[in-house]
Image (cartoon, coloured by chain):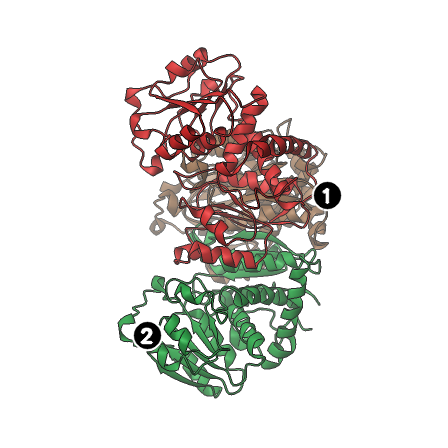
Chain colours: A red, B brown, C green
């Protein structure tokens, strides 16, 4: 199994993965990881060292990466949950200097969530140690989220080809819907419905990518219109901290009992979390809701799979 | 030894403990923990994983829990010292979602200090993994502090029955005096003197509990009046961050040489720390002062005892 | 090999080291540490516990200490990256109380970066566990930085005696140039050129020390004048957060191609990092630049050497 993506040791953006790698390596390996967690861990990454560097908040994602390392027997030798606020970043050190320094300490892998869009890709230019992008600043990417989303869909449908999916909410700034769109572009017959207010619509860079990859998509302001058509609804949170003007008055963007009643019996409701009020609590116990179950599990298995691939020969 | 308190795996509030458990299980086990620390640790929690989630400041308490885990051979797989400021909490995720997610990662135990009063008990509603409450927001509870306070008194007196204790300071907002009062209500013949300004007096919920449990208590504004009567003085800090108006001009609330001179030879001076100026430095070297010695040791042994009970069959 | 410096287990300031210890113990041991890192670690500190307590920002320095512990097989049982902002410090607990408490938990070594100048030395007064000062607030000291700087120079020159060095930038507040000056005072024939604006000149305490130790020094406002004379230029960052008024208009303080062209072929360019714009990027790839290479490596080996000396008999 190859630890590298065409000679590139880093996980930076969804476009870098091939369909062959996704289906032939990633998905089977993620399944293997589930057995390791069920056995309460293993030792295959014994002696391997992770540096976990978060410049932007995320209790859940940081925990997922750090536990993934532990379940595989590796060690998180350094962790920062607020690298940007104090630390050298505050003092004006460039990210490049920081990553040159970290590499001199010779960690085996570096997880980074940076507070500027291009952080992870810029760090990758100077890093010998593999970098795992744990989320760019919005709008940017969150490639490990896209991988776990892909696995979640695959485990329910058995295939990605022919998927009809609605992506709902703040598509202008949401990094997760951007990364997932790029990843779905690797498959055949996918159709995407983007549901958002006009002022929070998906950006052109993604749309142009989809055009080039023959992915059909449509835009709408009313989730009720598409709910019965799709195999999955991917709901997202309004990125208030990005200053999004999200005009809820001119459409329908919430997942509630009305939407559940419209949805197919075997469709699923997804959300990258954290959730505010865009999914009502009555949805939580519906068997089609996977945001507090399958997606979380896939997140752990996905990060374990990436670590195993990157850190073992 | 039972890992559960009447089928409830969590440590949330002082009321949940029975006298039988306190005397028959907790106190003897805490003594055993001292030997483990003297031996520089053991391996009985090998393979066990703790998540340590602090939404509110506490270097000392977090250190006590995390070292307790280490001395028993367990591992702290994730630690946050400021979960509330960044992280999903900032983004509006409910605590319930957070704990559902954390449980999917399958830690063996979760330590939480939350920044709202009902955090730990609410988290316990959805958590399969045992939760240890490392302190509610004031006014609330701090049950592991009450257990270590109880052990400190027990080790000096040999018994809790018949204890006369003064609790001094900001009783309106102090969570430690609240938890300790509830815990002392499990014993016989305890008498409590609450010493505070009128506007920082103990709340009615605790007083009603004491009435129901036949614990005598009296209220005062002058520590000098009760100092010679008691076996222990439990001093607390003014919770400035809670907006307490603490009028020092109308009473006597400081522990100094005057109070030491009044106190019995075998009485003790307690404080949950951090201390500001409510105990003068001349008290520190008096053999009756236990806030920088016995209480700290008992804190470590208490958390070790709880972890051992909860995590071993 | 002695774990103590004249019976003093702590590393607080550069003055405490003797030339005999530096040359006979520290430098050889640091070389041994390089082999351990090349072998991806060892187990000589197995069972040893470090507490890492940072009250002031530093991703790089904290990482260096924590990885040093890991490479030697020890464990970081507790780490805080912002101890001062939340935690008991905020609530007014004195540092003395904090260190008395931490010592009761019986760690084997405590690393501290405090946000007031006298922190580490004050903590050392009450701490049985050895304290490693990871940097005072400016102006103060940063003794482990001075040791790694010394090693960097020694490895290039083979000797410290007769060294000519320029120290440039905010000498008023820079703790690194202070600690390095004190350390160079242990050797013979050293000459220091202090290059700074008049309002950011080296303080009298250091100058008086140099006088007493027969170290020649001169002050200048133009790096071009001294660049061709020296074996090393030690550049530093303007401590904006210290309120330094740094008047760049009346001298020459930047290291750029002009300075490189003036420097000797075997001279070196040093910087403690983080760097802002006082070294231009064209310098980075010059073989004389050691701030992103030799100094970083020496930092790791220096902290490992100190930990090994302190924690093994």
Vertical comparison of A127 with C301: above or below: above
Q: Name the spot of residue C309 as percent of width and height, x first.
A: 65, 68
Determine whether, in the image, residue C86 is placed left or right of residue C104: left
Q: Name the spot of residue B157 as percent of width and height, x first.
A: 64, 48
Determine whether, in the image, residue C30 is placed left or right of residue B194: right
The N terminus of chain A - image quarter: top right
Vertical comparison of C111 with A229: above or below: below
Toward the viewer: A58 or A173? A173
Secondary structure of residue under mark 1? loop
For label 1, the residue is B44
Q: Chain of mark 1?
A: B
Determine whether, in the image, residue C238 is placed left or right of residue A120: left
Toward the viewer: C64 or A235? A235
The C terminus of chain A - image quarter: top right
Question: Looking at the image, can residue B205 be seen?
Answer: no
Question: Looking at the image, can residue C43 be seen?
Answer: yes
Q: Name the spot of residue A65 as percent of width and height, x first.
A: 56, 41
Q: Name the spot of residue A125 as percent of width and height, x first.
A: 48, 52
Vertical comparison of C248 with A1: above or below: below
Separation of marks 2 and 1 at Cα, in angstroms:
63 Å
Labelled pair 2, 1 in contact (Cβ < 8 Å): no
Report how many numbered discs are placed on residues in the image. 2
- The mark found on residue A247 in the picture is none
Establish whether labels 2 and 1 are both on one chain. no
Residue neighbourhood size for the residue with mark 2, other residues' Cα within 10 Å, grouped as few (<14), some (14–19), many (≥20) = some
Toward the viewer: A185 or A170? A185
Vertical comparison of B27 with A210: above or below: below
Secondary structure of residue under mark 2? loop
Q: Chain of mark 2?
A: C
Residue neighbourhood size for the residue with mark 1, other residues' Cα within 10 Å, grouped as few (<14), some (14–19), many (≥20) = some
For label 2, the residue is C252
């Amino acid at each position: 199994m190859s630890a590298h993506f065409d000679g590139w040791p880093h996980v930076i953006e969804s476009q870098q993965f091939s369909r062959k790698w996704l289906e032939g390596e990633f998905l089977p390996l993620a399944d293997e990881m589930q057995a390791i967690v069920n056995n309460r861990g293993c030792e295959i990454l014994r002696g391997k060292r992770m540096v976990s560097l978060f410049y932007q908040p995320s209790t859940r994602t940081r925990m997922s990466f750090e536990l993934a390392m532990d379940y595989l027997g590796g060690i998180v030798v350094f962790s920062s949950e607020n690298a940007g606020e104090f630390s050298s970043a505050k003092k004006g050190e460039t990210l490049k200097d920081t990553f040159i320094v970290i590499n001199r300490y010779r960690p085996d892998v570096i997880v980074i969530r940076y507070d500027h869009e291009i952080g992870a890709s810029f760090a990758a230019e100077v890093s010998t140690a593999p970098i795992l992008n744990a989320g760019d600043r919005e709008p940017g990417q969150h490639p490990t989220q896209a991988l776990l989303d892909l696995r979640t869909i695959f485990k329910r449908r058995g295939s990605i080809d022919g998927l009809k999916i609605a992506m709902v909410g703040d598509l202008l700034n949401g990094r997760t819907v951007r990364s997932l769109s790029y990843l779905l572009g690797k498959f055949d017959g996918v159709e995407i419905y983007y549901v958002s207010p006009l002022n929070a619509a998906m950006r052109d860079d993604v749309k142009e990518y989809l055009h080039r990859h023959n992915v059909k998509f449509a835009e709408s302001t009313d989730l009720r219109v598409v709910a019965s058509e799709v195999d999955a609804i991917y709901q997202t949170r309004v990125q208030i901290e990005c200053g999004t003007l999200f005009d809820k008055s001119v459409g329908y963007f919430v997942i509630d009992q009305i939407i559940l009643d419209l949805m197919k019996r075997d469709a699923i409701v997804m959300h990258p979390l954290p959730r505010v009020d865009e999914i009502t609590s009555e949805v939580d116990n519906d068997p089609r809701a996977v945001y507090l179950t399958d997606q979380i599990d896939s997140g752990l298995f996905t990060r374990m799979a990436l670590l195993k691939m990157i850190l073992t020969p």
